[in-house]
Amino acid sequence: MRTFFDADADLSIIRGRKVAILGYGSQGHAHALNLRDSGVEQIVVACREGSPTGAAAEAAGFRTMRNAGAAAWADLVMMMAPDEHQAAIWHADVAPHLRPGSALAFAHGLAIHFKLIVPPPGIDVVMIAPKGQGHGVRAEFVKGGGMPCLIAVEQDATGRALPLAVSYAAAIGGGRSAILETSFREECETDLFSEQAVLCGGLTHLITAGFETLTEAGYAPELAYFECLHEMKLIVDLLYARGIAEMRTKISNTAEYGDITAGPRIITPEVRAEMKRILADIQSGDFTRKFVAESAAGYPELTAARTAAAAHPIEAMGRKLRMLMPWLAK
């Protein structure tokens, strides 16, 4: 992958733009604050009237507008609304006002890759996707570091879309570590797969299954919680800082031997085959179609799953044990 750093970025490009951030949530607040600290003077935050995030943006010193007004004012619109709302916002508020030669930016590729949004030919369409949660993007920037960023150009109407994406990524801190060039398709499909098969779907269901296996065998739920959920942070922190091989050097020989012998019994050929079917559903657009339909129906499946998860014994045990560790709330 082609990689860029601060030395490759011309910050005057983004400093010369009027930037509208549509949404002041986890990523939106980090982008707005980091851009401002990097010398971007013309920033507005777009939000609904009466929105608590709008009040937070104003408290942070940002000018706020409604979506349509922000799109008419800006020459770079960064879409930070949830994936399932972006198409409606685009059609109602952004598309009628975005001028030729301006730029439409995203922090995730779903709406463009699966054509929930089809921009007109006269604008640049770029992606700047930090590889971390928004509060981490801000925290790393404040410490003097930066979260690695993915960038992509879907449409280059002006011939200057790539330098713009590099400039924006550097202004939010990406150039302090690495800015890696990819495509909307590659970012979107790998991101959805990792969420479903590993980071969220795979991990949470593995933890829950481990807790259930121990408690059904008669072990104390307190121990099951500590062993299957609480101690996950130790391993994840080691993985994050050192990778898999070095993580194994920091755990006991007993744990490492269990890792290499039991791991293949959990991640079986059948599990790998199911991972490929999950990836195929993502690539075909089947997952996105189902998700859009779920959103349109008012999230019945998601609501039922949230209710069931909240009622699981692992949650009650977690609340009880976390009360013994008040520092976790900080």
Image (spheres, helix red, strand yellow):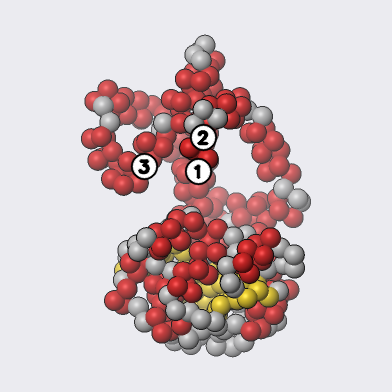
Q: Is residue 321 visible?
A: yes
Badge number at residue 235: none
- In the displayed structure, does residue 170 sit left or right of residue 307? left
Determine whether label 2 and label 1 are within 8 Å by CB: yes
Mark 3 or mark 1: name the one nearer the start of the chain.
Answer: 3
From mark 2 to mark 3, how far is it between C-alphas?
20 Å
* Residue receiving disc 1: 330
> Can residue 121 be spotted in the picture?
no
**Residue linked to disc 3:** 237
Q: Residue at x 48, y 37 (%)?
A: 327
**Residue 45 appears at what percent x and percent y?**
61, 72
Q: Say which of 159 and 147 sits in front.
A: 147
Q: Amino acid at mark 3?
A: Asp
Residue type, mark 1 in image: Lys
Spot occupied by residue 317 in the image (x, y as percentages of width and height): 57, 25
Disc 3 and disc 1 in contact, CB within 8 angstroms: no
Task: Pick the residue in front: 216 or 174.
Answer: 174
As drawn, 227 above or below 242? above
Quickly name the residue at label 2: 326
Q: Position of residue 75 (x, y in %)?
A: 57, 84
Distance Cα–Cα, label 2 vs label 1: 8 Å
Q: Residue at x 38, y 66 (%)?
A: 174
